[in-house]
Image: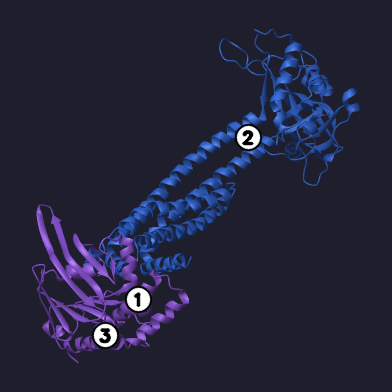
Chain colours: A purple, B blue
Amino acid sequence: MSQALIEVRDLWKVYELGDVRVEALRGVSLDIAKGELVAVMGASGSGKSTFMNLIGCLDRPTRGIYRLEGTDVSTLSSDARATIRNQQIGFVFQSFNLIARTTAVENVELPLFYGDIPIGDQRRRALQALAAVGLGGRESHLPSQLSGGQQQRVAIARALVNQPSMLLADEPTGNLDSRTSSEIMELFRQLNVQQGITIVLVTHEPDIAEWARRVITFRDGEVMTDVAQKGRQ
Amino acid sequence: MKLLRMTFHVAWLALRRNKLRSILTMLGIVIGVGAVITMVSIGQGADAAVQQQIMSLGTNLLMVVPGATTAGGARSGWGGVSTLNVGDAEAIKRECPAVSDATYFKRQVVQVIYGTQNWSTVAQGSDLSFPNVRQWPVASGSFFTQRDSDTANRVAVLGQTVVDQLFGPGQDPVGAVIRIKEVPFTVVGVLQAKGQTTWGQDQDDVIVMPFTTAERRVVGAQFLGTVDMIFASAESSSEMDEATDQIRGLLHERHRVAPNQEDDFTIRSLNEMAQASQSASQVMTTLLLSVASISLLVGGIGIMNILLVSVTERTREIGIRMAVGAKSRHILLQFLVEAIVLSMMGGLAGVAMGIAGARATSSIAGWPTLLSPTAVVGSFLFSGAVGVFFGFYPARKASRLDPITALRYE
C-alpha cells in the first residue's frame, strides 16, 4: 500500500440544534491511500455527506484528527481551508454547480483565479482541462447550452484544473441518465488509472459503487463495512 | 492587481446580467449627484453674480454716511443730519494711510430736458476722484476737470440710462446742451454702463457734475460743503479694517466726538455687504445640498437593498466560489466592487446629468450658473463612498456565508 493521502482518526461531528444534539459522525477512523478509487455509501443521514464535507475541508470536525498528505488540517482557519480546497481538492457535485451565464472555460478558470495563476496561463490551462474531459471546442458554451453530461464534464475539468491530489465527487451521477452516468464513471476510472488521481465518490447507488475498488459504507455516523473489490473495468 | 482587475470583470458581468435592475439601482445615485452639481452650480452662479454687482460699486470700498445707526431712543436715520462735509472727505484722503483715495457726493432728484425729451434722474455733485474710487471710467468724451470744479462750470457727465432716455440712436451726447432744473449744462462725457446694484437700483441713471456746480446751481444746500456720503477706497482688501479705524479716529477728532458719546456718522464696508449676501447664498446652497444629499442617501439604500437581493440570489454561486478556493475576502471584495462600480457609474451619469442640468437652467430659466469642479469631483467621490458604505454590509454578509449551506441553497 502506498503512502496515505487521507488519515482520519476518531473523527466526530456533533451539531447542537437548540436542545437537540445530533451526532452526525461518531468516531470514524480510516486511511485512504494515493491513487485509490473509493466509494462512500450509506443511506441518507448515515453521515456520509458530513464525512465528505470534513475531508473536503468545507467544515471542521468537532473532535478528532484529519491529516491530508501528512498535514493536520482539522484545526485550520477558514482562509487556510480555502487554500487547501483550492490547491489540493477538486469537487464534483450532483447538481454540477456551474456558475450560470458564465462560459464553460470561465467556469473552469475559477480555481485558477483564486489560486493566483497568471492570467495568460489561466486560459491555456482551462482549455487543456476542457480538452482532457472531451469538451474541446465547447469552451465558450454557457451551461444552459450544454447537456447534463457535458455540464458534469465541465465540472470535472474545473475540479482538475489546479491538479489537486484528490477528487471528491458527491453523487456525481445523481442527475444523469444511466448511459451518461456510465460515461462519467468511465472518465473517472480513466483519470484514476491513467493519471493516478485519488477519487472519493459519495453515492447511494450500488451500480455506481461497482466502479470503485474499495467501498466504505456508513451507518449512524460510523463505518459499518470497508471492503476491497475488483472494480469495474 | 490582477485580482482587482478580475474582480472588476466579475462585477461588471454580474451587473450586465441584470441590466435593467442595475440601471434602476443607479438612478438614485444619478439623481443625487446630478442634483448636487446642478444645485451648487446655481448657488455659486447666483453668488458670483451678486458679488460682481457689489464689487461693481468699487473695490475695497468704505462708505461713510452721516448720522447714527445704534438702535434705541428717537434718532434720525442715516444721512438724516448733514454732519459730513467736504473737509472730512479731503482729510480722509490726506491723512488716512490705509485709504488710497476718497470721493464724496451730494445728490438730488432733478428733471432734465434735451430737445423734446425729458427725464427724471439723480444729479450728483462729486469731485475728480469719482471715476477712480468708483472704478467707473468714461466711455466717451471725458470727465470734468479741476478747472470745471474750481469755477463751478455747468458741465455734466451722463450715465448710460440718461443718454438712452434723452438721445436718439446715433446721436452723440458729448457736446450737447441739456437743461437741468432749467439751467443749461454742456455734456462733456458719458460714463460706462455699470448695471444694477444688488438692491436693484440702476446705477447708470445718474448725472455727475462738479460738486461746486451742484451746490450752486442744482441742489441748493442749506449748509454749504455738506455731503450725503463719502466713499473711501482702502489700499487693499486686507487693510479694510485698518482704514475703517483710521477714518473713525479722524472723524472723532474732527467732529469732537467725546468717548462716551455716540458717533455722528456710520462707516459701512462693501465687503460686509458682500459677506452678508454670501452667507445668505451659502445658507441657500447648504439647504439645496442637504436635499440632494438625502437623494444620495436614498440611492445608497437602494444599492444596499439590491445587493442584499443579489447576495441571496447568488448564494449558490458564492458557495461554488468558496468550494473552489475563494476566501472570504475575495467574496467581500467582489460584492464591494460591485457596489462601487454601481455607484460610480451612477455618479458618472449623475455628473453628466448635473452639468446638463446646470446648462439647461442657464439657457431656459436664464439664471447664472457656475460649474464648480469641487462639486463635480466631490459628489463623484462621494457616490463612490456611498457604494463602499452601503455595499459593505451585504458584502460582509456574503463573505460570512458557510460554504456548505451556500452550496446546498436552493
Which quarter of the figure is the C terminus of chain A placed in?
A: bottom left
**Quadrant housing residue B244:** top right
Q: On the image, numbered disc 2 is attached to which residue?
A: B198
Closer to the chain start, of discs 3 and 1, is: 1
Q: Which residue is mark 1?
A: A107
Q: Chain of mark 3?
A: A
Q: Give the residue type at disc 2.
A: Thr
Task: For label 2, count other residues whose C-alpha is less than 10 Å away and answer few (under 14), some (14-19) or many (20+).
Answer: some
Disc assigned to residue A192: 3
Task: Depth check: give the residue in front, A65 or B274.
Answer: A65
Which label sits in the foreground, 3 or 2? 3
Left or right: B103 in relation to A182: right
Q: Nearer the viewer, residue B119 or B399?
A: B399
- Disc 3 residue type? Asn
Disc 2 versus disc 1: nearer the observer: 1
Separation of residues labelled 2 and 1 (CA atoms): 68 Å
Per the model, the C-alpha gap separating discs 3 and 2 is 90 Å
